[in-house]
Image (cartoon, rainbow, N blue to C red):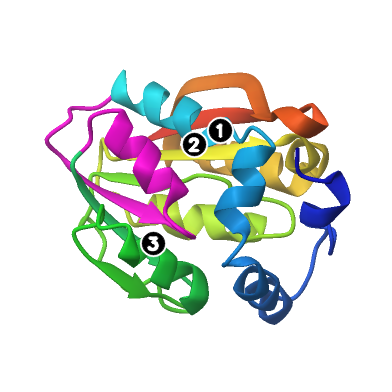
């Protein structure tokens, strides 16, 4: 079993500037898959299964913040076939592209997501909008990239749920009439550390 200290250094679930986040994941790219798999990383498959119950399979999906492609692989296992991926960390993105599961991949930046509004009827952001990764302010622009009835599937792990800024951002989208929550369920995230996560699906109004 992976030593708990190996994957948690530096501490993942703390706020940091985007440049430091990119550096953390760039340095982690070679070992990321093995380490999170050894810990029992459940959220990607939970999210993909939930999405499969709410969306048609022949549809184009954007795996936003795709990392090394673990989320894309989970979407494939759930029956989705047309998946594109983007990430802000080139080293992680190269791993994702090498999997051969994405139709196309590209490097995005915090200032330019690299796609137009309405391009994708479904956007997935598994473990992306979370403490220590993308800030809560990322949620609203992602919702805005969807046309009416488009879906955004995301997850908040336990540390993220304790940081009220993320829940506040979610509720702001709902209360403003931009989106509605059509699915939300708490379940296992990382088995090895007993951490859970909420899987959430939003529908654009």
Q: Which residue is mark 2?
A: 44
Q: Which mark is residue 43?
A: 1
Q: Would you name the residue on which mark 3 appears?
A: 96
Q: Is residue 29 above or below residue 181?
A: below
Question: Which residue, as the protein is rendered here, is positioned at the far front?
Answer: 1
Q: Nearer the viewer, mark 1 or mark 3?
A: 3
Please provide percent x and percent y for residue 197. Answer: 66, 30
Tell whether label 2 touches label 1 (CB within 8 Å).
yes
Give, as a single range, the part of the protein colored magenta. 54-80
Identify the mark nearer the N-term, 3 or 2: 2
First in sequence, mark 1 or 3: give its number. Answer: 1
Instruction: Provide residue 194's location: percent of width, then percent of height.
Output: 79, 27
Give the residue displayed 75% in from the left and 36% down from the top: 161
Magenta span includes 70: yes
Q: Is residue 104 above or below residue 123?
A: below
Residue displayed at 57% across by 30% down: 42
Residue 9 visible (yes or no):
yes
Q: Which mark is residue 81?
A: none
Q: CA distance from mark 1 to mark 3?
A: 18 Å
Q: Quadrant of residue 55?
A: top left
């Amino acid at each position: 079993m992976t030593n708990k200290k190996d994957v948690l250094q530096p501490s993942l679930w703390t706020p940091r500037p985007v440049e430091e986040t990119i550096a953390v994941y760039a340095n982690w790219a070679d070992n990321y898959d093995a380490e999170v798999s050894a810990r029992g990383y459940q959220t990607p498959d939970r999210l993909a299964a939930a999405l499969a119950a709410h969306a048609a399979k022949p549809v184009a999906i954007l795996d936003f913040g795709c990392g090394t492609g673990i989320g894309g692989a989970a979407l494939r296992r759930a029956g989705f076939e047309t998946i594109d991926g983007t990430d802000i960390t080139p080293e992680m993105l190269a791993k994702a592209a090498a999997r051969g599961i994405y139709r196309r991949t590209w490097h995005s930046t915090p200032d330019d997501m690299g796609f137009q509004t309405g391009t994708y009827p479904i956007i997935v952001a598994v473990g992306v909008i979370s403490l220590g990764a993308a800030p809560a302010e990322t949620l609203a622009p992602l919702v805005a990239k969807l046309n009416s009835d488009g879906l955004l599937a995301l997850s908040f792990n336990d540390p993220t749920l304790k940081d009220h800024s993320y829940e506040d951002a979610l509720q702001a989208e709902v209360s403003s009439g931009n989106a509605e929550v059509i699915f939300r369920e708490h379940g296992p995230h990382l088995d090895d550390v007993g951490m859970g996560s909420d899987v959430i699906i939003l529908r654009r109004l």
